[in-house]
Amino acid sequence: TVTPDGSYQLLLSEVQWQAMQSSQALSGINVRASKDKRGFFLVEMDRTQWQQMQMNMKIIYTQTIMQQINVQSQQGGGYVLILKPNQYDILVNIGAFNGINV
């Protein structure tokens, strides 16, 4: 949720909060979470923190996808990426090929 003052609020279960902390999604971000009566964590971020978290998530996602790609080097210095059916579309959508003529 975006609040009237422009901050971002996330309402997370305990499992989701722990996953956020352990996945490096909050790397470089100093946020605090408060627990509500139902056991959910309320995390509030300003715009800069939100953008940093989005960038961190993109990096984590890209690294996960890249670990699943088979790369073969070619004679002459080129590389061939062997992708699963949806990996190419995912890589294009996250900008992994920006600046590369594929």
Image: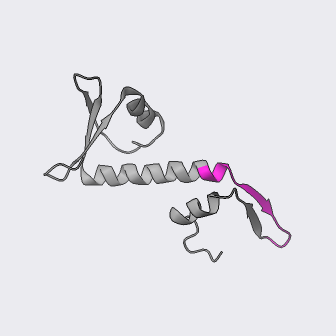
Say how the picture is coloured. Answer: one colour
Quarter holding the C terminus?
Answer: bottom right
How many numbered discs?
A: 0
Q: Position of residue 83 (x, y in %)?
A: 70, 58
Q: Is residue 8 visible?
A: yes
Residue 20 is one of the magenta-drawn residues: no
In this view, the residue farthest toward the bottom is 101
Which of the pair 24/91 is nearer the observer? 91
Residue 90 placement, left or right of 3: right
Residue occupying image coordinates x 38% and y 49%: 53
Which of the pair 87/18 is nearer the observer? 87
Residue 67 is one of the magenta-drawn residues: yes
Residue occupying image coordinates x 53% and y 50%: 61
Residue occupying image coordinates x 34% and y 55%: 51
Q: Position of residue 98 (x, y in %)?
A: 54, 71
In this view, the residue farthest toward the right is 75
Residue range in magenta is: 65-77
Residue occupying image coordinates x 42% and y 37%: 20
Residue 13 placement, left or right of 72: left
Q: Position of residue 45 (x, y in %)?
A: 26, 45
Q: Position of residue 71 (x, y in %)?
A: 75, 58
Among the 4 quarters of the image, the one containing residue 99: bottom right
Q: Is residue 95 visible?
A: no
Which of the pair 75/42 is nearer the observer? 42
In this view, the residue farthest toward the left is 4
Residue 76 placement, left or right of 33: right
